[in-house]
Image (spheres, rainbow, N blue to C red):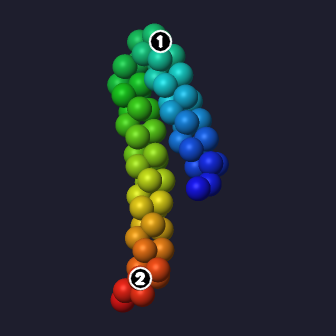
């Protein structure tokens, strides 16, 4: 498995959590929530692409059409 994707997800999580904390302390709770939501959506999109790639490989392996 490619470890780069794990580092990307971890990096996004760290950056989002820091931005969310900074915005929350600055009194901008709505922007902090939006930042968290955008981070979750970005990570979910990455995971969805990985799952789609997995299904494609499984179909190829078992020669399913």
Label 2: element kind: loop
Q: Residue at x 41, y 49 (%)?
A: 44
18 or 3: which is nearer to us? 3
User: Badge 1 local density, few (<14 within 10 Å), some, or many (20+)?
Assistant: few
Relative horizontal placement of residue 42, taking residue 10 as reference (left or right): left
Residue 14 image-quadrant placement = top right
Please provide percent x and percent y for residue 30. 35, 25
11 or 51: which is nearer to us? 51
Relative to residue 60, is residue 54 depicted above or below?
above
Q: Residue at x 43, y 74 (%)?
A: 58
Relative to residue 26, is residue 37 depicted above or below?
below
Q: Residue at x 62, y 54 (%)?
A: 2
Separation of marks 2 and 1 at Cα, in angstroms: 54 Å
Q: Which mark is residue 26?
A: 1
Q: Nearer the viewer, mark 2 or mark 1?
A: 2
Of the image marks 2 and 1, the number of the one nearer the N terminus: 1
Work out which quarter of the rendered image holds the C terminus and state it.
Answer: bottom left
Label 1: element kind: loop
22 or 58: which is nearer to us? 58
Residue where numbered disc 2 is placed? 62
Residue 25 image-quadrant placement = top left
């Amino acid at each position: 498995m490619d470890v780069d994707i794990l580092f990307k997800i971890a990096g996004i999580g760290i950056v989002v959590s820091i931005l969310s904390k900074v915005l929350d302390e600055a009194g901008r709770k709505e922007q902090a929530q939006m930042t968290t939501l955008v981070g979750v959506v970005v990570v979910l999109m990455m995971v969805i692409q990985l799952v789609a790639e997995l299904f494609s490989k499984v179909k190829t392996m078992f020669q399913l059409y």
